[in-house]
Amino acid sequence: MQMKTEIEKKWQKLWKENHIFEPEMDGKKFFITVPYPYSNGALHVGHGRTYTYGDIIARYKRMQGYNVLFPMAFHVTGTPILTIADSIKNGNKDVIDLYRDYLHLYENDESKIDDLLKKFEIPENIAYYFAEKIQKDFESIGYSIDWRRKFNTAEPYYNKFVEWQYKKLYEMGYLKKGDYPITYSIVDGNPVGEDDIKDGDTDKVSIVEFIAMKFKFEDGHILAATLRPETIFGVTNIWVNPRAEYVKIRIGKDIYFVSSYAAEKLNYQIGNVEIIQKYKGDYFLNKNVIELINNRTIPILPATFVDPDNATGFVKSVPAHAPYDYIALRDINANIDPIPVIRVEGFGKIPAEEVCEKFGIKDQNDKKLEEATDLLYKEEFYKGVMLDNCAQFSGKMVKDIKDQVKDWLISKNFAIKFYETSRKAVTRSGNKVIVAIVKGQWFIDYSNLEWKKKTHSLIDRMNFYPQSYREKFHDVADWLKERPCVRRRGLGTPFPFENGWIIESLSDSTIYMAFYTIIHIIRENNLNPNDLDEKFFDYVFLGRGNARNNIEKELRENFQYWYPNDLRVSSTAHTSNHFIFFLFHHTAIFPEKFQPGGLMILGMLISEGAKMSKSKGNVIPLAKIAEKYSADLFRLYIISTADYDTVLDWREAEVKSLEKRLEKFNQIVEETISAKGLDKFNDMDLYLINKFWMRFNTAKDLMENYKFRDAIIEIFYNFMNDIKYYEKRESAERARMVLKNILPEWLKSLAPFIPHTCEEYWHMLGKNTFISIEKFPDKREIDMKIIDEVNYIENVLIDIKNILSVSNIVPKKIYIYTASERTKNLVNIAKKDKNVAFKEAKNKDELNILKQVISQRLFNEVNINEKETLLKAKSYIEKETNAEILIDSDEDPGKKRNLALPGKPSIFILK
RNA sequence: GCAGGGGUAUCCGAGUCAGGUCAAAGGAGCGGGACUUAAGAUCCCGUGUCGUAGGACUACGAGGGUUCAAAUCCCUCCCCCUGCACCA
């Protein structure tokens, strides 16, 4: 085991010293990337899976003669590293323990760990420490990365690059400023994400946009919030909760009546809420309001279902279409007629009434009301048509005009927006979560139709692995809308158009692959970050203007040579964020010829059947992989256990079992290296050689489509089984002699997967080149006849063994008869026309043969001479069956001769 | 809810687009055997049911349909996974 690691380290060192993975412009290029990792801690095998795929593709392409660029960098943008540094500073035990664990992966000295933890109070130190370790880890797996081009996203060069990118987006009008609703904790004074909310991961909290309708009341308006603004035409009354607390508030010039809860929320949504007076709910009872559309006067009535802590605390009542309203009116015996405004197929005039009857609703506290509401809402939304009393919306489908009604109400000043959480939520420390609005938030406007169109067209042009993601990305592109792109705090690039904002972490990582093409040259020339101004990037990336010096010229050439990014490999988790931004930003900034060529999306990695998580203790860190298993075993395991697009389950037991197989492979290869070659081959030798090329041909086709798992099954697993079979027929010693003939090609075909092993054996064969940059073999013609013959014999053996097992005979003699010319003719005729064949048949046997052949469709082409084949394998069959074999004997004691079919000889066994 | 992807033998997992060669690759597990003082490792055989002649039957989430023929095509239903926005 120690040996293995030593060997791997040796080759890693030699590759590095010889700069074989540091390409310069030369020949046909292939540029592959994997998203850079966020370097706030040790990586695990899930990250390793993605990079392993990237590396195998890079290595395969390289061996096919492409000039391959496979770079990486480190992501440090955003708040997490900041939060971690703060937590360590504040003595947060969980975080300190976690980081102590991470450090134990790399450090033995306890006092050094303490020092490092102290240093981690400064966020940059965390990022730089782990970036360095991640590089070491990656090198230990043998990734063919060009490390000269690494950078991190907080360094000045990168900042200048991102700044430039945002200037371009701004010029194009893709940056917008506006208000944005977020979940927020009043007590903490902070926005809260899913992680901050109690049960936020299991029971998601989303933001719901209500329309708060205005109803004239006293010197202001009552706000009654609704999710169904289209039913406003059917409003008959307002609901108030008599026991709840309400307030009169002033916001600017507007006077509103809402619940106390709602007033607080409005303060965070609109701001400057001034409370004028407080009321108990019953204050409003039996007073009237005027609805603004038709200026009807309607009453305010009591209802206990009204929750003052949901929306505005007043509810508009549409009894014709809302089961709650219908039942609440019935509960208080109100003499109010529902006003229908929607006609829906399968329902009469008052759908709410019907639904309530159908569900047998007792009163407004009945749990089934929720269900009834859901059902009716869906029916009316998808199938409903607005009736004649609905102004310009009359006669239209509900689903078509719902949003128009919303916009219309707001533009007429009949309503305002009110945001509410989709459920009652509190933070992990128990503080209430509301929806607040961030003012002056900068967005990237992905809703721009022109931009979407360009991106759709890119999606059509690109390659996707697997194919199904093309469809998925079209959907995601449509779904994408404005997205905030800056935050108040975090590491990263300051926003160039307004002080006090940092470009958010997913928004600074969209076109950075372009940066890989030039960063090493910038560094070599030690450019001043200030030289990387707008003109600089305009020229280098867009060819605008002229080069101001030779360096800029060189950078431009490098960019033009390497771009576009031919393939980007990552996991499915990035689909609706990073990947889609990657596509959008490329279509925004670069011309078609520099837009991405392909995307490969890997499935996720789980461990022992469960998602990796600290609490389950099943996280497998990458740091110890090479030491514990060897890099090549890891790589082989990653590639052979699951197809790239499916979930990979990391199982210790299977890794162990694969290790044995890899050892077996090593043993075979080592024996082969010390064996003599052969210059004359027998049939079985040719079989093994042909079988290798057959496997290889299949594997190469599979690899062209990045189906590496299937490829490795062919050239590793299956071919090793072929060798086993050969050994049974001939001998292990001779197998090595035959293998000597194909070993160089076998090693080359496996080099992308297990490069260290192959490199080592390649050199043991006396070669002094690197197998990593040897040419991948071409496919070869194979002699199928040799393979068919062996398969034929095996089928005969299976038949014999089958008979023996069923009949319990201990055989003495086994008669094997091949099909007569007469039978072959008959089958040939039957193949063309079964009726003619039946006429041709002379006796019962022949008729039976025809029936069997036709019903089982035994028309397969038989290209071999069956009798000769059997004769050649006679001693083998005898050995396998422990009986005397008679082929096409004149004797026919079992009357079986006439039953022989082409390709399926008849057999008779004598005790 | 919306969107995407799935349900295959004890388990994991190919096969489904282009229907027959599929009782279904590969692996794990399990059973038997060889080797061994023994264990482990390794190798061989087996692993749906039945069967004294190479076969028959039952099977690929459930049900129905198309077809000479369905894991594969069509319809209906059930179940599972992933993502859903500022979080890297």
Image (cartoon, coloured by chain):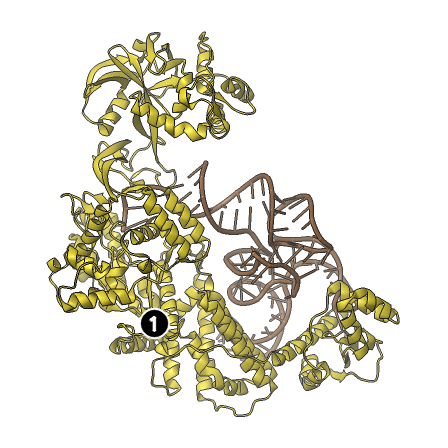
Chain colours: A yellow, B brown
Instruction: Say what secondary structure mark 1 lies in.
Output: loop
Q: Left or right: where does residue B44 sit relative to residue A222?
A: right
Judge whether residue A622 can be spotted in this image.
yes
Residue farthest toward the front in the current orientation of the protein? A545
Q: Position of residue A660 (x, y in %)?
A: 46, 72
Relative placement, left or right, of A397 versus A451 is right
Give the residue at x 33% y 7%: A287
A727, above or below A640, in the image: below
Q: Using the image as rendered, state which of residue A832 and residue A392 is in the foreground.
A: A392
Q: Taking A9 as reference, is A104 above or below it?
A: above
Quarter holding the C terminus of chain A is bottom right
Identify whether A649 is placed above or below A790: above
What is the quadrant of the N terminus of chain A in the image?
Answer: bottom left
Image coords of residue A412 (percent x, y): 30, 22
Q: Which residue is mark 1?
A: A28
Frontmost residue, A249 versus A123: A249
**Furthest-right residue in this view:** A843
**So how many labels did they put on this image?**
1
Question: In the figure, residue A190 lies in which quadrant?
Answer: top left
Q: Amino acid at mark 1?
A: Lys
Kindly indicate the quadrant of the structure image that contains residue A590. Answer: bottom left
Residue A580, image x and y in percent?
34, 50
Depth order, front residue of A547/A658: A547
Q: Is residue A657 among the parts visible in the rendering?
A: no
